[in-house]
Amino acid sequence: MDSFDTEILKILQTSSRISTEELGVRVGLSASACQRRIKRLKAEGIVSNEVAILDREKLPGFITVIIDVTLEKGGEKALDKFIAQLNEESRVQQFYYVAGEVDFVVIVVTKSMDDFDNLCRQVLMSNANVKKFSSKVVIKSEKVGMAVPL
């Protein structure tokens, strides 16, 4: 990766729908050079996905909850099983395996508090390896992003 790749990635993180012509003007390359670089960055897995980001505040009823989870026991099999369960759950937006007082920090978006209760029952309470969990309901999101500070 060189400085052109870094600049391309910075721009794509803010808007992946930019034309290669505009991208080329902004980074100082031709449109075809930008297109080749983007193709390579995708092939290398550096650009792993392109998605539409929805504004949850404009969609009625959705709530975001941050959950701290402590497992009863560790070990590779127990961790892999819990990680697989989180990956399968569409309401789980992000999760982090962390060092410290808890084992995982999980960010979920649900349609309602009833939906959140169902998620807790299905994913956390029914899992014998979950020792404890605590939840924080997000009142308002001030900054939400996934950009890597290149």
Image (tube, rainbow, N blue to C red):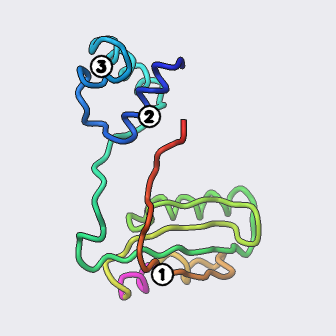
Q: How crowded is mark 2: few (under 14 residues within 10 Å), some or many (20 or more)?
A: some
Q: 125 or 143, which lies in front? A: 143
Q: Earlier in the sequence, mark 3 or mark 2?
A: 2
Q: Name the residue under label 1.
A: 137
* Label 2, label 1: how far apart the Cα atoms are: 31 Å
The residue at the point 55 percent across, 81 percent down is 135
Give the secondary structure at mark 1.
strand
Q: State the mark number for residue 146.
A: none
Toward which corner of the image does residue 149 lie, by quadrant? top right
Q: Is residue 56 magenta?
A: no
Give the secondary structure at mark 3.
helix
Toward which corner of the image does residue 55 lie, by quadrant? bottom left
Q: Does the magenta stretch include residue 115?
A: yes
Q: 131 or 128, which lies in front? A: 131
Q: Mark 3 points at which residue?
A: 25
Q: Earlier in the sequence, mark 2 or mark 1?
A: 2
Front: mark 3 or 2: 3
Labelled pair 3, 2 in contact (Cβ < 8 Å) = no
Total number of numbered discs in the rendering: 3
- Majority secondary structure in the magenta region: helix
The residue at the point 69 percent across, 80 percent down is 131
Q: Is residue 143 left or right of residue 35?
A: right
In this picture, which residue range is highlighted in magenta? 114-119
* Label 3, label 1: how far apart the Cα atoms are: 43 Å
Give the secondary structure at mark 2.
helix
